[in-house]
Amino acid sequence: MSHQALGTDTRPAPGLGRVATQLIRLYDDAEPLLLTGGETLAPVDVAYETYGELSPARDNAVVVCHALTGDAHAAGHHGDPAAQGWWDTMIGPGRPVDTDRFFVVSANLLGGCRGTTGPSSHDPRTGTPYGLRFPAFTVSDLVTVQRRLLHALGIERPYAAIGGSLGGMQALQWAVDHPGELAKAVLVGVAPRLSAQNIAFSAVARASITRDEHFAGGDYYGTGRAPATGLAVARMLAHITYVSDQALERKFGRARRAGGEGFEVESYLEHQGAKFVERFDANTYLYLTRVMESFDPFADEAAAAARLRSGGTGFLLVSFDSDWRFPPAGAREIERVLHAAGSSVRHEQIASPWGHDSFLLPVPEYLDVVTKFLR
C-alpha cells in the first residue's frame, strides 16, 4: 500500500532532481499478454521511470515494485521539488537504492490507473473503457509484465527486486516463479498470504465503492460522476490499518477541530480520502485488492521450496514491531520456508512507532539495513 504517512519528513538532500515518466507498449495484438487465468490482453502499455545508469554489463538493475496505490513515480520530482516520489527516502544518490551504483526501474503495475493498462483503459474491441470487464490477474502476472519491461530495456537478470507490502509480494513471487533470475530480493512489510482480518478490511473497502450510488456497475467513466464518496471512505478505512494506535495518539490524541466540532483525527482521515480520489481509480482499487488476496506463493510449499532451492536468491525480510496489518509473524513464516529451501535469508524486525507506513519513512535502522544488504 502506498500512502501518505504520519511521520516527519527528514529525507536527505540532495535527491534525484527532476525525472520523467515514460510509456512503452509491451504487448499488442500480434503478441498479447497471456494471463495466468488463461485470458489474453492487448494492447498493454506500461508507464515507468528509470534512475541512474545501466552498467555496460547490464548487471546493476534494481526493480522497485510499488504497493497497492503506488505508481511509477518513486523518486525525484516532476517539476515541483516539494512533490517527491513515494519512495524518495529509499532511492537516490547515496541512499539505500543508490542511483550512483544502480540502474533503478520503477513501473506502474498492470491494472493500474497511472499510465499502465487497467480497467480505465479503452478496450479496443468496444472502444469504451474496460471497467469490470478487465480480465482478472495475479501477482504472477504483475511479475510477467515487470520482466517484459526489463527485457525491453535490455536487462535479462536484474541485480535485485525491492518492494513493500504488495511490492514485496511481487519480489517474492518473482523469486519463486523464476528461480535464479534475481540475485537479491528485499521484502518489506510482507505476509506469505493475507489473513482473514486483512481480507475483511478489503471486503468492507470494496463494498464502500460498489455500493456508492455513482458506481454504475463499474461503468462510471465519461458520465461526469464517479464513486468518489465510496472510494474516499475505502481509503479512510485502509489508512487506519496502515498506521499504529501509537502513531495516531502521538499525532492527534483527542485534540478537537477548530470550533470544537469533532476531532482532528477525523479531519486527517477526510483529507486522506479527498486526496486519494483525485489520483486513483475505484476499479483499479477493486482489482488490486483482489490480487493481494490471491497471493499465496507457498500454497504448495514443497514445490515452492524446490524452485527456491534451485535459484540462489538472497533475501532480506524487514518487518516493523508496530505493523499490525502485516505483523512480524508473517515475515517469520516466510523466513521459515526460505530457510527450509536452503535460501540465504536475513530477517530484521525494526522498532518503529509508525505501523505499516514505516516502510515509506526515513527510519534510520531500516534504511541502514537495506543499504548494507544491497551493497
Image (cartoon, grey):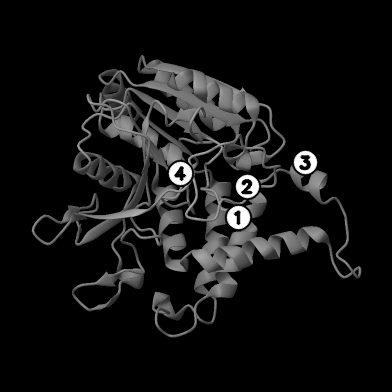
Estimate the x, y position of residue 103 in percent, counting from the top left. Answer: 35, 33
Tally of numbered tags: 4
Q: In the rendered structure, which disc, 1 or 4, sits on the residue that comes first in sequence?
A: 4
- The answer for how far apart the CA atoms under marks 2 and 1 are is 7 Å
Counting other residues with Cα less than 10 Å from the Cα at mark 4, is it few (<14), some (14-19), or many (20 or more)? Answer: many
Front in this rendered view, residue 219 or 205 = 219
Circles 1 and 4: CB atoms closer than 8 Å: no
Find numbered disc 3 in the image and state the secondary structure of the residue it sits on. Answer: helix
Q: Is there a contact, CB below 8 Å, between mark 2 and mark 1?
A: yes
Q: Which residue is mark 3?
A: 246
According to the picture, the residue beneath numbered tag 4 turns out to be 166
Q: Which mark is residue 238?
A: 1
Q: Is residue 294 above or below residue 32?
A: above
Task: Tell me the amino acid under the disc marked 4.
Answer: Leu
Examine the rendering and report whether any part of residue 258 can be seen: yes
Task: Tell me whether circle 4 and circle 3 mark residues in contact (CB < 8 Å).
Answer: no
The numbered mark, 4 or 3, whose residue comes first in the sequence reads: 4
Q: Locate residue 287: give its quadrant.
A: bottom left
Q: Nearer the viewer, residue 326 or 266?
A: 266
Tell me which label, 1 or 3, sits earlier in the chain.
Answer: 1
Give the Cα separation between the discs numbered 1 and 4. Answer: 14 Å
Q: Mark 2: which secondary structure?
A: helix
* Percent of width and height locating residue 38: 19, 54
Q: Position of residue 374 (x, y in %)?
A: 44, 22
Say which element carries label 1.
Answer: helix
Give the amino acid at mark 2: Tyr
Amino acid type at image mark 3: Gln
Disc 2 packing (10 Å; few <14; some 14–19; many ≥20): many
Residue annotated with mark 2: 242
Q: Amino acid at mark 1?
A: Ala
Corner quadrant of residue 185: top left
The answer to whether residue 324 shows anywhere in this view is no
